Amino acid sequence: MADAVATVSSDGKQQINPLRAGLQTDRISDPATVVFFGASGDLFKRMLLPAMWAMRARGILPNDFAIVGFSRTEYSDDEFRAYCKEQLDAFAPDEQKPQGAIWDDFSKRLRYVSADFDDHKCYGNLAKIIGQNDEQFGTKGNVLFYLSTPPSLFPTIIDCLKEADLNPHEGKEGWSRIIIEKPFGIDLDSARALQTTVDRVFPESAVYRIDHYLGKEPVQDIMALRFANTIFEPVWNRNYIDSVQITAAEQLGVELRGGYYDNAGALRDMIQNHVMNLLALVAMEPPATRDADAIRAEKAKVLSAIQIPTIMDVPSMSARGQYGAGTINGKPVPAYRQEPDVNPQSNTETFAAVKLNVESWRWAGVPFYLRSGKRLAKKTSEIAVTFKPIPHRIYGDETDTIEPNVLVMKIQPEEGVAMRFSAKVPGPKSHIRSVFMDFNYGTGFGVQSPPAYERLIGDALRGDQTLFTRWDAVERAWEVVMPVLEVWQNTKDFTFPNYASGSQGPQSSFDLFPGWRSL
Amino acid sequence: MNLDVHPLVAELTHARHSAGSMNAATMTLVVFYEDAQVGSWVRSRTRAIADKHPSRVLLFDGTKNEGDQHAEPSATRGEWVEIGVKGSHASEIGAALSMLALAEAPVVLCWIATDLAADERFVTLAKQAHTIVVSSSVIRSDERPLRDLIAFVEAHPEIVVQDIAYLRLAAWQELIAEFFDEPEFLEELTALREVEVHAGSDAEMYYLLGWLASRLDWIPCAPDAMCNSSGDIIHITEQRDGSARRLSKVELRSKDVVFSACVHPDDPDAVCLEVTGAKSRKERCAPLHTMDIASLIERAILRSSVDDIFEQSLALAKLIIERKVS
């Protein structure tokens, strides 16, 4: 919401635009140029460009904005505009196809730099174009850089930005911010090395480490559920909660990402970032305000309370798996080792499960079980909080099982909240059975959630870091998974492949925790 | 007359009990209309709102007789009830609402009819509602509905009413405000001497003028002029053209600078903005982002507090209209 906007006149007096008072608008007020590194890549054409166009069509982008694509593929500005139109025709929703005066205006604001990412002189060209945008479109020196290239190029690009004087520094007109796609490093050491590079060029207040999971509406609803209701918080602790399980399961295999994935694995690809972020949201203390610093401080605090396992702990607190051939949706699918660009003897895990302990007054003794895997029975992301059993039984036939309450926060593909509780079966006897109260945001509010990238790019342009991960949280997440990663890298699992595609995952995960919810 | 809704209550209660799953509802959405020409329009827009915010919809249809009523219960989300209220007394309609409103959800009233203060049915329903939405330009395009709203607000200051015709101006307000965000242009606000507004309906026209006047401390001082706090005269040109309920052009002129916002001739969803004269900005086109009526009503529903700017704009609109006709 924009309220009265204060500006400073030439005589130094602060003046208020009275027409701004009380106006409610989603429009981002700061003008800016957005530079996409990797503009000929898949993420740009499928997600980032459609997000920018949708924000423009819905009046969210500032009126004074420009977009610069930076990539190896050779395009002139006009060819890049034609490329963008082609991609939007393919990937934008039907009601938002590029046309009319708004597309004409949007396309005028598209520029392109064709270059190798380590070609330092091309960053001079980029700086020149940003300056021209300031002149032509009133972008006032504000620049948001979006790194959507392979992660190995991040340090080079960041260093080149500094060399071209495009980083935030004294005397520079406007702000410079940077969005860095995940993964932030491939292990603790590389993450720290990358952070050292980032630190040299951008202050933490200008760094937006993106995890698109955090832009999903149901993930944001976790905080709303906890902190916009009174009934959950009093029981949200070790006195009432027995365990927490977080699942990020996919039906898809590695698809065309075999080369990347075989060097990453499920622990790096999902647990260290997406799943740990979910854990932080579930376990954090209530922040004092909705302010980014307050929320990110609480998230970092709870991650710092996670006990780091020792190498000796790893076998008893983790389970790994790799999918074999199987059936998904009635169709046979190959084993991981038969996927394109995957080593036929690969030791990479496509399934990871860990048990973590949060050592705090609130959570001491409550295990957090995290699992993620590919080619599982169902695509499901959810958090299930299992409450303790009732302390004394007065209801139900002896043969009835009185199951503990479970609160499920569903993230995808279903989005909503479900609660399991016990109810009396109608009739003269006092039989008890479990029932599920199931609320879906889709049917509750009847709308699709807006795509995560729109929300996150918009927040970065507004300077709101709430949904982006702070360095201390990233570092701590790496510290927590590193012992597991080291053991798994250094010991070959001879049982691989140990679960069939389309199954519930490896038996070892049920040995770790028999209480996993069925996929 | 005998408006009996007991069968509907029984049917809805039975459906809820037999559904066996949770029924989500965020409000009781009451819609009243009595002009047959807008019937299908009212239904489609109400469906759009209820699709997003599951509701128990009570459609009071002033074109149908009392016996004409039916319910569409849903197993999971929302319910749709239509009740003929042609000839029904206000107290009967009020009692029907009491019987059918969900106990735990707020009542939102959308009134699509010409009279407000003079219509006892509106007054009765409004007193039972938490949010009241009217539209001063949906049935007529002259200034009469706006005058009626002004009369109602004066007679019932305790009831908060929101007008779709005003909410619709949000995009224009934003674009006009943006002209003056820069200090070099901000100083032109006090130097404005002419305002030209093109609109298809009076309500939007007077709301925009009322909003400008309320923000810039102008008061009507002649039928076609307002005066600022220094006594300078601002000439007003009202042009009635374009589609009903839509603004098509707003031009603000100081001695040396013209601020122009005009709907693109070939793209009704785009507004082209230009500043010319001693200070200038190149023309650029921005999405008008014209909100559909369902989204406007949603905005009214989500706005929980009194909107001071709306009230001040309405008060100034009243003075402008009075000055004109006096």
Image: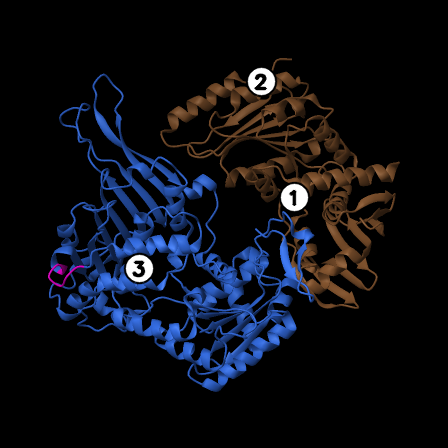
The quarter of the displayed image where residue B40 is located: top right
Q: What distance separates the C-alpha of mark 3 from that of mark 2? A: 56 Å
Q: What distance separates the C-alpha of mark 3 from that of mark 1? A: 46 Å
Q: Chain ID for label 3? A: A
What label does residue B31 carry, if any?
none
In the image, the segment drawn in magenta is A309-314
Chain ID, brown in image: B
Q: Nearer the viewer, mark 3 or mark 2?
A: 2
Q: Are marks 1 and 2 in contact (CB under 8 Å)?
A: no
Q: What distance separates the C-alpha of mark 1 from that of mark 2? A: 30 Å
Label 1: element kind: helix
Prevailing secondary structure of the magenta residues: loop
Chain ID, blue in image: A
Q: Is residue A127 something one can see in this rendering?
A: yes
Residue linked to disc 2:
B95
The quarter of the displayed image where residue B194 is located: bottom right
Residue linked to disc 3:
A252
The amino acid type, in three-letter code, at marker 2 is Ala
Residue linked to disc 1:
B167
Is B203 above or below relative to B269? above
> Foreground residue, B65 or A16?
A16
> Foreground residue, A277 or B247?
A277
> Foreground residue, A201 or A87?
A201
The amino acid type, in three-letter code, at marker 1 is Leu
